[in-house]
Amino acid sequence: MEIVVILVVAFLFLLLINAPIAVGIALSTFLAILALGNSPAAIVVAQRIATGIDSFSLLAIPFFILSGELMGRGGMAQRLIDFAAALMGRFVGGLGYVNVLTCMLFGSISGSATAAVSSIGGFMIPEMSRKGYGKNYSVAITTTAATTGLMIPPSNIMIVYALVSGGVSIAAMFIAGILPGVAFGAALMIVNGILSRRQGFGAGEVASAKQVLRSFSRAALSLLLVVIVLGGILGGVFTATEAAAIAVVYALVLGMAVYREVSFADLPAILLQSGITTGIVFLLIGASSAMSWVLAYENVPQAVSAGLLALSDNYFVILLIINLLLLFVGTFMDMTPAVLIFTPILLPVVTALGMHPVHFGMILIANLCIGVCTPPVGTCLFVGCGVGRTTVSEVTGPLLPFFAAMAAALLAVTYIPELSLWLPRVMGLVE
């Protein structure tokens, strides 16, 4: 138990002094292994980091990151905004609906919440502000809506969970995320509708059927990527990793040859940014794998499982406790290390209660989606504030109703297993 204390204290200290989270995880793990005294700590940490990223399936992550970068710069965001505006712009609070729907569509293509905030927010936040929604309200709805892209496939965090959980199908996780992602988007739309009526946010222009069809035709090639990726995986045509590579080729052709908004001169910057993001993600995966090894060595998952089950054997109470824990964790830890560290700890608890690992994966991801738009480590929140040129303190008030909507959707995902499992069962991906 002393080893765990050293690990936790060192990790929290490094977080408090604003060390990068990957560095904090690696150094605290190094100190914990050093305290074991059984082998050279540096060698063990290096071995565990290397082992943690030694997986063919993880190759899907850099490919999806690169495809997301290409899509963000390839003119797809504007086409999706136009399509969403044609569908939803006529209603009271129409631009809010457009914002949420566009983030859902863009997220389903790029798999990146921060890319959705910067790409969609770069246009929608100023436009909503001009139409009287208020800058802080616009930032709040964009920040929260962008998280739906982490649940609607394809999603890198689902790949990470599938690998660390040991045996969960990536395809099953992808399909399982569709209805929870829609549930989160619908909850945000409901709140937007209520607030828009109360605050008098007006409707936009009514689009004709011809305008809807025209906007759909402009966005269709972008939306087709989701069909290609999911259809290919489910049809057994290619694996998730191969699908990610195909997504890169498709996004490259679309951005350079069809839309012509990505040039050869843009490619070095796109590749550089993708490489930086990939390096950060893989360092997090490797370092978190080393920390997970220490926790497993010290039997922490078994101790946590026994402790939670000792508190209560009630299924609903245990899940409520787990949700509160994950919401707390999400406020100060990024999604990737949180999934890598807490999946081995909490998965045995929920499986002992009879929960399906795919269902728990969606609960875990849904909780952490809320964390990416909450301070102090909410990446989407800070990107949104940067795009909207405002501050976290000013956005906090408008965020609260949307947090309430996300919390309601989280409870639905938690206590209605069929939201996550119905589609995978229909498609024969889970029993």
Image (cartoon, helix red, strand yellow):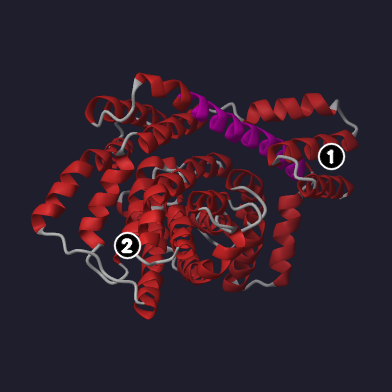
Q: Which quadrant of the structure image shows residue 392?
A: bottom right
Q: In the image, residue 34 lies at what x, y percent?
A: 87, 33
The residue drawn where x is 73% and y is 68% is 310
Q: In the image, residue 155 lies at what x, y percent?
A: 44, 43
Q: Residue furthest bottom?
A: 198
Q: Is residue 272 magenta?
A: yes
Are the residues flagged by discs 2 and 1 in contact, CB closer than 8 Å? no
Q: Is residue 203 left or right of residue 161?
A: left
Q: Which quadrant of the structure image shows residue 258?
A: top left
Work out whether mark 2 precedes mark 1 in sequence or the reverse, and give the earlier one.
1
Chief secondary structure of the magenta portion: helix
Q: Nearer the viewer, residue 238 or 253?
A: 253
Q: Nearer the viewer, residue 200 or 9?
A: 200
SS label for mark 1: helix
The residue drawn where x is 65% and y is 28% is 51
Q: In the image, residue 98 lies at what x, y percent?
A: 31, 59
SS label for mark 2: helix
For the record, the magenta segment spans 271-296
Q: Nearer the viewer, residue 301 or 218?
A: 218
Task: Give the residue at mark 2.
Answer: 95
Q: Is residue 194 magenta?
A: no
**Amino acid found under the numbered disc labelled 1:** Ala
**Amino acid found under the numbered disc labelled 2:** Leu
Q: Residues within 10 Å of mark 1 (few under 14, many from 20)?
A: many
**For residue 396, above or below residue 83:** below
**For residue 377, above or below residue 269:** below
The residue drawn where x is 36% and y is 74% is 196
Q: In the image, residue 252 lies at what x, y percent?
A: 33, 26
Q: Which mark is residue 32?
A: 1
Depth check, mark 2 against mark 1: the one in front is 2
Q: Residue furthest front?
A: 130
